[in-house]
Amino acid sequence: MDLTTMSYEVRDGVAHVRLTNADGANVVGPDLSRDLRAVMLEIQWDDAVRAVSVTADGKVFSGGGDLKHFHAAGDALPRVASDMLTDFHGGIYKMNRMPKPFVAGVRGAAGGAGLSLVTAFDLVVCGESAKFTMAYTRAGVTPDGTSTYFLARHVGVRRALDLTLTNRVLSAHEAEAWGLVNRVVPDDEVDAATAELAQTLAAGPTWALGHAKRLVYEGFDSPLEQAGEVEGVTIATAMGSPDGREGIAAFVEKRAPEFGRD
């Protein structure tokens, strides 16, 4: 891949993605959007990847949309924005639909499209300095980055409206209390904590983790009976899988399971 705004490396079953445009506050523009989609395609088709860690260089995880680029587009801006979102949203769609867990490590600010990207990850670790704000309406525009799908699922409709309409800034601990992030660690531990969590997931039962992720996202909007029916079919299938048999046997035999064996 010819990436310009991020790096990509696979180690021990974990794909390590890192936003590298620190001087530009890791803004979301056409380049990052293309890179995100390309990376997600790579992850999708690489069976060696069992979990993903996403972190960022610099003091800002992402400052949001590249407003300077948008301003320079002039009358062509609607088309420019639409083209960019085809890639940006396409990358997020793939991330959400993939049966692989994605963990983000956030240090510093995540605003606008940067926050939208954060909402799309399965798990989020953040540093104590992290701050989160929607910021869209401050610039006279509406949300993108699929935040209108994910944000209310994480924090509830009223809190999502508060963030979206008032551009309220959440501290790291407020974000944890609201359910926007999973855990807060010291800033200098963000990268290590994110990688460690991704590594733990990579060592787990891949099939079960992927389908558990799907069940949680799809079950949120499903009728009760449909959610229960899908759960029943999925767990029965999981029990017959190599990982399922190994996990059950390890529990009965009082030993640590060894997942990933055929």
Image (cartoon, rainbow, N blue to C red):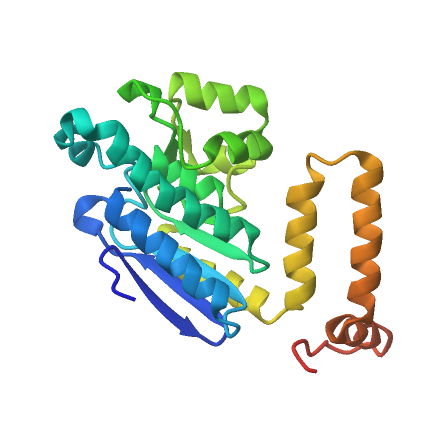
- Between 126 and 46, the one lying in front of the other is 46
* Number of marks: 0
Using the rendered image of the protein, determine whether residue 234 is visible from the camera's viewpoint: yes
- Between 210 and 169, the one lying in front of the other is 210
Quadrant of the rendering where the N terminus is positioned? bottom left
Q: Is residue 179 above or below residue 157?
A: below
Q: Is residue 210 above or below residue 180?
A: below
Percent of width and height locating residue 30: 25, 45
Quadrant of the rendering where the C terminus is positioned? bottom right
Quarter of the rendering containing residue 253:
bottom right
Instruction: Please give the name of the residue rendered at 48% of the width and 71% of the height, measured from the top-left corner.
Output: 46
Left or right of residue 166: residue 214: right
Q: Is residue 182 above or below residue 140?
A: below
Q: Is residue 131 above or below residue 92?
A: above
Percent of width and height locating residue 71: 16, 28
Instruction: Please give the name of the residue rendered at 77% of the width and 76% of the height, measured from the top-left corner.
Output: 246
Instruction: Please give the name of the residue rendered at 54% of the width and 68% of the height, measured from the top-left corner.
Output: 50
Using the rendered image of the protein, determine whether residue 109 is visible from the camera's viewpoint: no
Instruction: Please give the name of the residue rendered at 19% of the width and 29% of the height, measured from the top-left corner.
Output: 76
Quarter of the rendering containing residue 210:
bottom right
Left or right of residue 221: residue 129: left
Q: Residue furthest bottom?
A: 262
Percent of width and height locating residue 72: 12, 31
Left or right of residue 182: residue 39: left
- Between 55 and 84, the one lying in front of the other is 84
Percent of width and height locating residue 172: 43, 38
